[in-house]
């Protein structure tokens, strides 16, 4: 039997859990000339949702991870490289002749793809303008191109003027839909909702929440039916640990499934055993991460892992010896920027296994 759960990569059927309402919203936005901003904490399923939605539209897609870009010229080169994957070279040649800076192209003997680079020291503005305008020219009414920028808040890291440059180019495009994904809510909101930002109100903003608990539980039960006598009990135990976080739910379900199959569904301790196994596997990573925090951040993380109070309450600050709400708020902001804490209807640790590691270490 094949394990029905998958984590760590972009997923599609049969591993994709419906999110019907979210897919409907995304496809509705992109069916016109609208651009979309999708915000959620890391590993909540943004990339999988966009992949699923654009696949249903049957349109060409270019996806770029801004965290992996080193400069604006590198961004232009990687975008052109992906354009080469989609459009025939015969259509590209005539357009490339009109580039103000001619790109250097070479065939990668290992992958069989085209590698693209520009001469160092060249201004990034003409590079980005020529490449983005090329995407606009190649796109057609029936096959409009979709360009996805993952972790778009990283644009300022590449160059402080990059947002201004991109907006100046993109605002004239009518044949391309732009999708911007962001995991650091405060930074991405600043880009698209602050009046002084060049991207102010450039795109529709959508927030991606956790998958509905009932819907996720049904998916888990289906995966465990046939290998365990009480799949509903297993699903409930997993959801109690992960609270419906897509990545960690799939990871825990994967591990529980492997244990259940090896024991032929005889044990009811599989969820606890799987959590213990995952905590043990990541012990050194968690210790390294813990040692990187300052004293205030450690107190906040301890409180979130152990206490029932929320961090900005008087009782929380009293129990964990935190001097002022402003201090706690600054700590939360740092931890959220780093991806360790998320805020849904409450503040909580993003990684439930890290939370378990903290509690176990504290008890020792």
Image: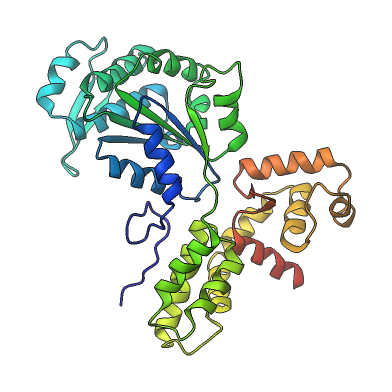
**In this view of the protein, which residue sits in the foreground, 70 or 57?**
57
Q: What's the coloring here?
A: rainbow
- In this view, 258 is above or below 81: below
Picture coordinates of residue 37, whole percent (x, y): 48, 33
Looking at the rendering, which quadrant does residue 72 occupy?
top left
**In this view of the protein, which residue sits in the foreground, 337 or 144?**
144
Horizontal side of 286 relative to 281 (left or right) equals: right
- In this view, 348 is above or below 134: below
Residue at 66%, 62% in the rendered image? 355
Horizontal side of 339 relative to 159 (left or right) equals: right
Horizontal side of 272 relative to 20 (left or right) equals: right
Residue at 23%, 32% in the rendered image? 115
- In this view, 297 is above or below 205: below
Residue 254, visible in the rendered structure: yes
**How many numbered circles are shown?**
0
Picture coordinates of residue 148, whole percent (x, y): 38, 34
Residue at 64%, 49% in the rendered image? 344
Horizontal side of 362 relative to 68 (left or right) equals: right
Residue at 30%, 26% in the rendered image? 77
Picture coordinates of residue 334, whole percent (x, y): 68, 41
């Amino acid at each position: 039997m094949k394990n029905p759960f998958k984590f760590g990569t972009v997923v599609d059927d049969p591993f994709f859990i419906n999110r019907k309402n979210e897919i409907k919203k995304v496809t509705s936005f992109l069916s016109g000339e609208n651009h979309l901003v999708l915000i959620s904490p890391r590993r909540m399923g943004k990339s999988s949702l966009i992949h699923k939605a654009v696949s249903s539209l049957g349109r060409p897609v270019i996806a770029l991870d801004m965290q992996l870009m080193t400069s604006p010229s590198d961004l232009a080169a990687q975008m052109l490289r992906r354009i080469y994957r989609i459009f025939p070279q015969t259509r590209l040649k005539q357009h490339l002749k009109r580039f103000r800076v001619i790109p250097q192209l070479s065939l990668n003997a290992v992958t069989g793809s085209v590698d693209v680079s520009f001469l160092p020291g060249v201004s990034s503005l003409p590079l980005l303008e020529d490449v983005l305008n090329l995407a606009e020219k190649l796109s057609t009414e029936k096959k409009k191109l979709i360009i996805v920028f993952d972790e778009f808040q990283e644009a300022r890291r590449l160059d402080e003027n990059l947002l201004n440059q991109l907006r100046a180019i993109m605002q004239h495009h009518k044949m391309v839909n732009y999708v911007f994904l962001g995991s650091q809510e405060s930074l991405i909101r600043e880009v698209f909702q602050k009046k002084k930002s060049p991207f102010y109100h450039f795109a529709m903003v959508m927030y991606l929440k956790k998958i509905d608990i009932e819907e996720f539980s049904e998916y888990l039960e289906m995966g465990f039916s046939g290998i365990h006598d009480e799949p509903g009990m297993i699903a409930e135990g997993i959801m109690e640990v992960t609270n419906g976080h897509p990545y960690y739910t799939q990871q825990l379900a994967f591990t529980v499934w492997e244990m259940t199959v090896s024991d032929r569904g005889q044990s009811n301790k599989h969820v606890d055993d799987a959590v213990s196994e995952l905590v043990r596997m990541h012990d050194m990573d968690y210790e390294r991460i813990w040692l990187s925090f300052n004293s205030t951040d450690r107190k906040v993380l301890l409180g979130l892992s152990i206490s029932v109070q929320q961090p900005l309450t008087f009782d929380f600050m009293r129990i964990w010896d935190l001097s002022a709400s402003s201090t706690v708020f600054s700590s939360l902001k740092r931890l959220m920027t780093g991806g360790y804490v998320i805020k849904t209807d409450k503040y909580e640790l993003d990684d439930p296994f890290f939370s378990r590691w903290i509690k176990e270490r504290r008890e020792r």
